């Protein structure tokens, strides 16, 4: 009897801690949305911030698109995200397949050296990439997108994650395919990619989130406001008079920028969890 009471008490404590943690994590998002639906005059006249909007309005969302170039920032970010993610998958999938299935001299040593790249501090990589991009003059005019995209089309972690998933596929399938005369490319596209779909979907979603939230590199390499991504655009809005004088409109812009990622995660959260757990389990 005491053990049952102890177990019930532990569950109540766990749920209580989870509830407190949920409030701590979600409250900033609630405050962001709350501020975005307040009138500017109401917000400025509040001596004590209120946790409920008395007269909510959506006019701040209109300001976010009409008074700043938020639409352009969205378009730039969409181009950057789609191009970077697509090129990365064209590099990641064949590389993972080569390390998982093909046999060539020095494969294990090469992969070990490849993994060692993860030990290099990000700051050093950024400096090297910046010097390269500037020397190639990819940070001028329309070539800005080249400077934004190309340094982000490889990822050691994603190659490693997909390699581990490919290695979990039984060797008998590969041997049977080779007996039937199936080429490596056809086996990759017809067998390995469909089987590894949860992990591939997870990698795509994580890369999309990474691109959408990218700030340091676009901030460093982009000189013209016409090429700003949403992260740079929000910073530019904050630094301008508009962002400082009209906080509710600023928060509305942040909500608009954050909404696609929130929806993406809510829709694909099961696939993300399945892909990560599958990638870390062999057999």
Image (cartoon, helix red, strand yellow):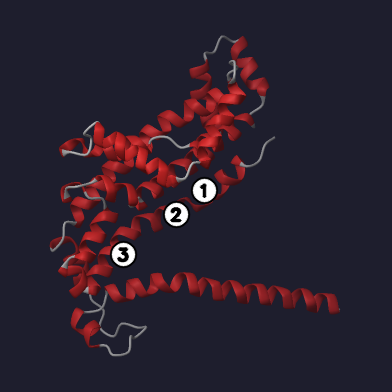
Q: Is residue 13 left or right of residue 40?
A: right
Mark sitting earlier along the chain (1/2): 2
- Quote the CA–CA distance across marks 3 and 2: 15 Å
Category of crowding for the residue at label 3, using alpha-carbon neighbours closer than 10 angstroms: few (below 14), some (14–19), many (at least 20): some
**Depth check, front residue: 133 or 56:** 133
Which residue is located at x 47 percent, y 41 percent? Answer: 203
Q: Quadrant of residue 45?
A: bottom left
**Depth check, front residue: 17 or 8:** 17
Category of crowding for the residue at label 2, using alpha-carbon neighbours closer than 10 angstroms: few (below 14), some (14–19), many (at least 20): some
Category of crowding for the residue at label 1, using alpha-carbon neighbours closer than 10 angstroms: few (below 14), some (14–19), many (at least 20): many
Q: CB under 8 Å between callouts 3 and 1?
A: no
Q: Residue furthest bottom?
A: 47
Q: Position of residue 125 (x, y in %)?
A: 40, 41
Which residue is located at x 17 percent, y 61 percent? Answer: 65
Which residue is located at x 21 percent, y 79 percent? Answer: 39
Asked whether residue 58 appears in the rendered view, the answer is: no
Q: Quadrant of residue 2?
A: bottom right
Q: Which mark is residue 265?
A: 2
- Quote the CA–CA distance across marks 1 and 2: 8 Å
Q: Position of residue 172 (x, y in %)?
A: 67, 20
Residue that numbered label 3 is attached to:
255
Q: Residue furthest right?
A: 1
**Judging from the image, what secondary structure is the residue with disc 2 in?**
helix
- Quote the CA–CA distance across marks 3 and 1: 23 Å
């Amino acid at each position: 009897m005491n053990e049952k009471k102890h177990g019930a008490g532990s569950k109540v404590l766990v749920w209580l801690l989870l509830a407190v943690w949920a409030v701590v994590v979600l409250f900033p998002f609630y405050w962001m949305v709350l501020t975005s639906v307040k009138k500017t005059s109401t917000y400025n006249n509040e001596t004590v911030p209120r946790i409920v909007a008395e007269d909510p309005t959506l006019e701040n969302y209109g300001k976010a698109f009409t008074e700043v170039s938020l639409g352009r920032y969205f378009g730039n970010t969409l181009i950057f995200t789609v191009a970077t993610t697509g090129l990365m998958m064209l590099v990641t999938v064949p590389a993972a397949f080569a390390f998982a299935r093909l046999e060539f001299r020095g494969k294990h040593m090469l992969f070990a050296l490849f993994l060692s790249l993860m030990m290099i501090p990000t700051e050093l990589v950024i400096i090297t990439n910046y010097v390269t991009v500037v020397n190639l003059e990819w940070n001028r005019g329309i070539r800005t997108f080249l400077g934004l995209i190309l340094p982000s089309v490889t990822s050691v972690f994603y190659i490693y994650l997909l390699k581990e998933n490919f290695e979990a596929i039984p060797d008998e399938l590969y041997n049977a395919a080779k007996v039937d005369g199936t080429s490596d490319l056809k086996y990759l596209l017809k067998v390995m990619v469909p089987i590894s779909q949860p992990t591939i979907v997870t990698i795509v979603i994580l890369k999309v989130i990474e691109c959408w939230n990218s700030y340091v590199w676009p901030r460093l390499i982009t000189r013209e406001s016409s090429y700003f991504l949403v992260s740079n655009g929000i910073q530019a809005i904050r630094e301008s008079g508009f962002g400082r004088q009209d906080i509710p409109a600023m928060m509305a812009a942040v909500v608009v920028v954050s909404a696609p990622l929130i929806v993406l995660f809510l829709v694909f959260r099961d696939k993300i969890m399945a892909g990560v757990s599958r990638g870390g389990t062999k057999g």
